[in-house]
Amino acid sequence: MEVLARFVEWVPVCPEVEVGMGVPRETVRLIGSPSGPRMVAEQSGKDWTREMQDYSRKRLSELKKISLSGYILKRNSPSCGMERVKVYGRSGAANRGQGLFARLLMDEMPLLPVEEEARLNNLSLRENFIERVFAYDRWQAFMSGRKSARSLFKFHIRHRLTVMAHSQKHLRRLGRLVAASKIRPLREVCGEYGRLFMEAMAIRATVRGHAEVLRHIVRVFSRQLDAEERKELLGIIKEYHRGLLPLIAPVTLIRHYVKKYRLVSLADQLYLNPGPGELMLRNHG
């Protein structure tokens, strides 16, 4: 939170307090069907379902206006749990529900990067979430500006290697969309592009995927490298692929060659500069 606070503005939301449950408050839990549970206070039996749903719709309407770039939910919460929240039925509890607020949040903002706080202890999930947050922020900036087939093409080119590391299947589909932007309504194309782009970013990039991107980059400028430089770079990529080096090692060397040989086609690639350096997104993957 401290590192991210230098780059984002935190917006605290506590549905249970804001709906009027107070602090301290009586424990509530989800009861009934996982697809449509009720939120009921454990001791008093008060049913908070309607109030929570009404509050959630109103609060989400407010949150939409400030263009959120990501959302961190609370694990196991009957209001804010993203998944595997206990829902109590006649036969006991089943870990397959969602918090009432969380469900509406993800329904109303389907492109928004969402993650649970406990899952962010996993390095891979955390890096993927942060990368998605910055990617979504850039997409929102694109959508709020003056759009054209050319500006969409530029956005796509800047993110091409990033998407490639996550999903080559999505990259091909996005490429076809960009090509179609000259003949299809731009608004329609952008809507579909945004959905596919964030869908691709939600797929965690693998070591193999990164290695393929790195080798692709080498092929782009291999003629500029002498035999010793090429051997060194390919060797570092191989060591990364084997798990002996972090991703930042080959990326840093590639950045050096991009600057040394003035490789304009790679200089603007967000894959080589995924976000603020302080976040060190490439130091571990």
Image (cartoon, rainbow, N blue to C red):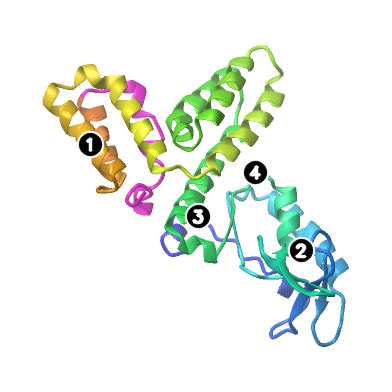
Residue type at tag 1: Leu
The earlier-in-sequence mark between 4 and 3 is 3
Q: Are marks 2 and 1 in contact (CB under 8 Å)?
A: no
Which residue is pictured at 75% across the width and 59% down the height?
59
Q: Which residue is mark 3?
A: 8
**In 3D space, how far apart are the residues under numbered discs 3 and 2 (Cα atoms)?**
26 Å
SS class, disc 3: loop
Magenta stretch: dominant secondary structure: loop
**In 3D space, how far apart are the residues under numbered discs 3 and 1 (Cα atoms)?**
29 Å
The boundaries of the magenta stretch are 261-285
The earlier-in-sequence mark between 3 and 2 is 3
196, above or below 239, in the image: above
The earlier-in-sequence mark between 2 and 1 is 2
SS class, disc 4: loop
Q: Nearer the viewer, mark 3 or mark 2?
A: 2
Residue type at tag 4: Leu
Residue toward you, 18 or 192? 192
Residue type at tag 2: Leu
Magenta stretch: includes residue 40:
no
Name the side, left or right, on which 64 lies relative to 226: right
Name the side, left or right, on which 222 lies relative to 29: left
Q: Which mark is residue 111?
A: 4
Q: Which residue is mark 1?
A: 253
